[in-house]
Image: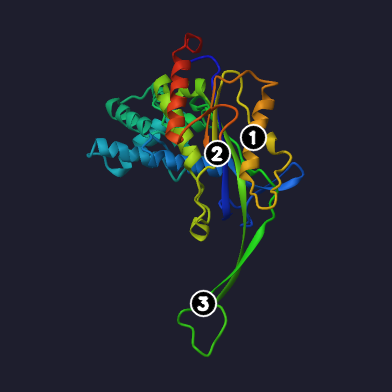
Amino acid sequence: MTKNLYVDINVLQTVPSSNINRDDTGAPKTAFYGGVTRARVSSQSWKRAVRKALGEDGANIGTRTKRVPQMLAAKLQDLDASLDEDAAMSKAIDALKEGGIKTNKDNETGALLMVSTGQAAKLASYVLENETLDKKEVKKILMEGNSLDLALFGRMVADNPELNVDASAQVAHAISTHEIIPEYDYFTALDDLQEKEKSGAALIQTTQYDSATLYRYANINMAELSYNLGDEDAIEGALTFVKDFALSMPTGKQNSFANKTLPNYLMVTVRDDTPVNLVSAFESPVVAKAGEGYVENSVKKLENEYKDALQFVDQPLATVAVGKYETTVGEQAGNLQDLLDKLQDVLKKAVENEDFNN
């Protein structure tokens, strides 16, 4: 696939009192947008949640660690039980060195490195089958067999840029569609064995939280994902990403707030010109009228922004939405699986079209 093909994912989701992504002071992250303070959840936080969801969904995911030598050494010992720990580690470090990856005195890489299970296994087999290692072959192994998360989120290797993998997905920081006012929860804890004549709490603390209707956005560059995975796996990977992006939730303070919710609205658009983040729909914050919340008006503003964007971009190949509100801009899906089925049909048709293949 060589021509542009993008999948835009737009989510509106109400999250109750929570602190799913906090800053260095422990407060929920915020952003100043449209002249007011918004709730914010960082893209890094949601990508972490998506990676975990991909694994739970049975997708092939990699390992991001500084302990790549230990991981490779363990693979070597699995394949050759005669290798002791020191010999396996020596072979692992030599192999990584041939790939241009440096290790320190603690036998760790200088920075976190993402490696797929397939890459580690194939490299271990190659090391055992060849007394002399070829740099080009080692690099080739480390560039093939990408896991889904590696293909989506990419890899940067400062030691050897030749091992870099360009990300095929972009994830925006989620922000509330409306102004928020941070709140504080004052709480105490009692000592179960406290003497009867004593009174008062054993612990007094406060924790900050907020509640918000979030606008979440991500996109997939299908040409890049196809380059990283191949056409067939790229389509399957895109569908899995859409599902897990929609359903995942960062876990910050989840035991204190039990804030796991589902999207109120999901709109997926397939474009062949450029991805479009529709956050400008909320530059003027949504204001809740008496007796009403934020979701319905947020949906209306988002769909109006979608229509306004058509003044600048081409008509999308397809737009499918699902949620409690009937869409005015595309095809209505009956449920999430129906949306994924419709998206699959569009992507297959686009990939099969000769315009999207070399």
Query: Nearer the N terminus, badge 1 or badge 3?
Result: 3
The reply to whether the C-beta atoms of the residues labelled 1 and 3 are less than 8 Å apart is no
The reply to whether residue 106 is visible in this rendering is yes
Q: How far is the residue under mark 2 from the one under mark 3?
A: 42 Å
- Nearer to the camera, 297 or 274: 297
- Nearer to the camera, 139 or 300: 300
Is residue 35 left or right of 291 when viewed as pictured? Answer: right
In the rendered image, the vertical position of residue 159 relative to residue 212, given as above or below:
above
Q: How far is the residue under mark 1 from the one under mark 3?
A: 47 Å
Quadrant in the rendering for residue 183: bottom right
- Nearer to the camera, 93 or 240: 240
Q: Amino acid at mark 3?
A: Leu
Q: Amino acid at mark 1?
A: Leu
Q: Nearer the viewer, mark 2 or mark 3?
A: 2
Label 1 residue SS = helix
Label 2 residue SS = strand
In the rendered image, the vertical position of residue 316 relative to residue 285, given as above or below:
above
In the rendered image, the vertical position of residue 67 relative to residue 27, given as above or below:
above
Q: Which residue is mark 3?
A: 190
Query: Nearer the N terminus, badge 1 or badge 2?
Result: 2
Is residue 190 left or right of 127 when viewed as pictured? Answer: right
Residue ID at (47%, 37%)? 113
Q: How far is the residue under mark 1 from the one under mark 2?
A: 10 Å
Q: Which residue is mark 2?
A: 265
Residue 323 rendering spot, x and y as whole percentages: 52, 38
Q: What crowding class fits label 1: few (fewer than 14 Cα within 10 Å), some (14-19), or many (20 or more)?
A: many
Is residue 60 left or right of 223 when viewed as pictured? Answer: left
Residue 85 rendering spot, x and y as whole percentages: 30, 44
Query: Nearer the N terminus, badge 2 or badge 3?
Result: 3
Q: Which residue is mark 1?
A: 302
Residue 218 rendering spot, x and y as whole percentages: 56, 33
